[in-house]
Amino acid sequence: MTRLRTNNPDWRADPRQIVAGGATRLTAFLTNRWKWAVTAALGLLALFAVIAGYFLWSGRKDTDAATLLQKAATQLEAMTQNGSDEAKQVEGIRLLRAVIERYSTTAAAAEATLRLGTHYYAAGKYGEARSVYTTYLQKNPRGQIAFSAALGVGDTYLAERNYEKAVETYSRLTEQFSQEPLLPEAQLHLAAALLGLNRGKEANELLEKVVATYPNTGWAQRAQSELYRSGLSLR
C-alpha cells in the first residue's frame, strides 16, 4: 500500500497539540479584534467630543452675539427716546460694529449690519450706510441679508439722486436675485430711479409688470399709485 506523504506538520501532530494550537490562534485573534474594537470606540468618542464641543462653542457664540446686539439696540433706542445723546449713539454704534467684527458668521451680525446701515441712512449719512452694506456684500455675496444689503446700497444712491448708479445697482440686484420673494420691492425702487433719469417708458413698463405679477398686494397698490402720480397709465 502506498503511504500518503505530506509536508504539513499538523498532519502528523498529536491531536491535543492541534487543539492547543488552534486555541492559541483563536485567543490571539480575539485579542487583536478586542484591541481594534477598543481603539475604534475611543476614536468615536473623541469624534463625538469634538462635535459636541463645536456645537457648544457655536451656541455660546450665538448667545454672546445676541447679548451684545441687545446692548447696542438698547443704547440706540435710549438715544431716540431721550433725544440727541451723542454718548449713547457712539456707544450703540461701537457695539454694533463689535457684533459685526467679532461674530461675523452669526445671525446677530447680519442684523447688526442692517441696523447700522439703517441708522446711518436715517441720519442722512449715505456714504457711511453704503460702506456698511458694501463691506457685508464683499464678504457675503450670497449671505442671508445679501438682497437687503444690496437694496440698501441702491437706496443710498437714490437718496443722493445719483440715479445712474441707483439704476445700475437695482438692475444688477433684480438679475442676481430673480427668485427673491422681495424682488418687487427692488423693482419699485428701480422704477423710481428710472423716473429720476426721465426714462418714463421703462419705468411705466416695470410698474405695469409689478401690478400684473403681484396683483392684490401692497406692491401692486404702490405701483399703481406711482403710475397715477407720475401721469402714467396702465395700458
Image: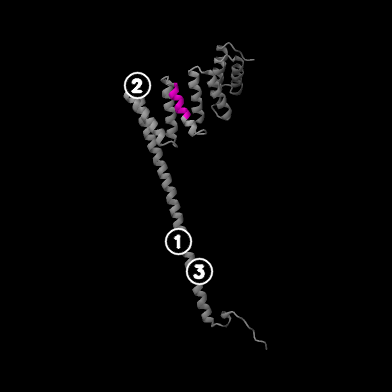
Q: Is residue 25 above or below residue 221?
A: below
Label 3 residue SS: helix
Is 206 one of the magenta-colored residues? no
| Callout 2 touching callout 1 (CB < 8 Å) | no
Label 1 residue SS: helix
> Quick check: 8 left or right of 151?
right
Residue at x-position 44% and y-position 31%: 111
Secondary structure mostly seen in the magenta stretch: helix
> Quick check: 33 left or right of 89?
right
Range of magenta residues = 126-134
Closer to the N terminus: mark 3 or mark 1? 3
Quickly name the residue at label 1. Answer: 38
Residue at x-position 65% and y-position 86%: 3
- Disc 1 marks a residue whose amino acid type is Val
Report the residue that reaches farthest toward the right.
1
Label 2 residue SS: helix
Closer to the N terminus: mark 2 or mark 1? 1
Mark whose residue sits in front, 2 or 3: 3
| Callout 3 touching callout 1 (CB < 8 Å) | no
Residue at x-position 51% and y-position 71%: 26
Q: Which mark is residue 29?
A: 3
Which quadrant is the C terminus positioned in?
top right
- Disc 2 marks a residue whose amino acid type is Gln
Q: Which mark is residue 81?
A: 2
Measured as percent of width and height from the top left, residue 8 is found at: 59, 79
